[in-house]
Amino acid sequence: MSGTAVSSRDDVSKSVLSSLECPVCMEYIAPPITLCQNGHNICSCCRKKMFRCPVCEGQFLSVRNRALEDIAAAIEYPCRFSHLGCDEAYPMDRIGKHHSKCSYRVYSCFFDKLSVCGWKGRRQDIKRHVLDAHEKGALDLDDGASSCVSWEVPNSNCYRDSLQVVFCLGEVFLYLKRFDDSRKKLFVLVRYVGGRSAAARYRYKLKLRAPDGTQKASFCSTPLTEMDETERVFEAGECVVVDFDLLLRFVKAVKTMKILRVDDVVTEL
Ligand SMILES: [Zn+2]
Ligand SMILES: [Zn+2]
Ligand SMILES: [Zn+2]
Ligand SMILES: [Zn+2]
């Protein structure tokens, strides 16, 4: 095997891999892969949120790119943090899970938007940093065993914007509340720190229960990931949304948040 043959093969796999990258979320595109009228590929998640091709603004076609899907099924994907030193590669159905747990990935402190912290580090170091530097913003519920955790939302804190990092089920979640006066709604959002396929294994729930037990309401959703931009999610209401009217009926209610692991069979379609 000559050197040039190897390098041209490397070039081929690089160009195949780059056509398998979604131009919007930059994740590898999993089948079904759909096309725009000019042949650009996009992942099904991003396509749902767009009316036109993000590359050329052309219309989407209703056909699938079977050739690329076959290639996608046959190759191994290098970890997207290979430039940081990770040398692992996996088939399409497992690379997402690896990305969400890859120990080479570098995260910025979640509190950077509220106050400048500037910390950057790996997933396994997030907990120590948050407990050390942002203790009030941490909720440590890891017990190593259960597949479900819950905590009470104090009524005093219910009507306030907040961000907390929740350590539970061996994972890291962000728990955000947004009290929107102009839209008369409370938005509650749980974000999974990691990839989409791993996030799909969890649900979060907000339960309201009147003190006398007569009235109940509950809301459930799937955690978002960092691919989903917070402002857009609040704007589109793609999280738990509670109307003020309902909230007023539950002023003194016990409010419980819950994060649970769902059946492993459930996958994102
Ligand atoms: Zn995408
Ligand atoms: Zn296009
Ligand atoms: Zn990796
Ligand atoms: Zn920090």
Image: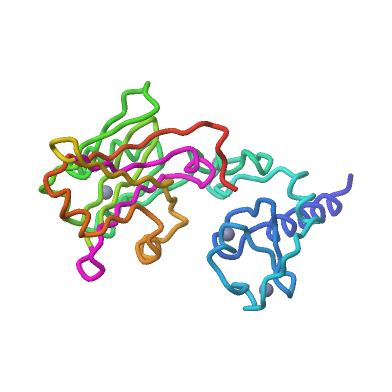
Residue furthest out toward the front: 214
Looking at the figure, which quarter contains the N terminus? top right
Residue 209 vertical position relative to residue 41 in the rendered view, above or below: above
Find residue 202 and report its horizontal and vertical position in percent: 44, 38
Residue at image location 25% in from the left, 41% down from the top: 216
- 34 relative to 194 in the view: left or right: right
Q: Which stretch appears magenta?
A: 180-209
Q: Quadrant of residue 52?
A: bottom right
Colour option used: rainbow
> On the rendering, which quadrant does ligand 1 occupy?
bottom right
- 209 relative to 45 in the view: left or right: left
Tell which of 269 and 1 is nearer to you.
269
Find residue 73 and report its horizontal and vertical position in percent: 75, 45
Residue at image location 40% in from the left, 27% down from the top: 147
Find residue 25 and report its horizontal and vertical position in percent: 54, 60
Find residue 263 and report its horizontal and vertical position in percent: 51, 31
Residue 171 vertical position relative to residue 228 in the rendered view, above or below: above
Q: Quadrant of residue 205?
A: top left
Residue 25 vertical position relative to residue 102 in the rendered view, above or below: below
Asked whether residue 126 is drawn in magenta, I would say: no
Residue 187 vertical position relative to residue 232 in the rendered view, above or below: above
Residue at image location 85% in from the left, 54% down from the top: 4
Tell which of 50 and 97 is nearer to you.
50
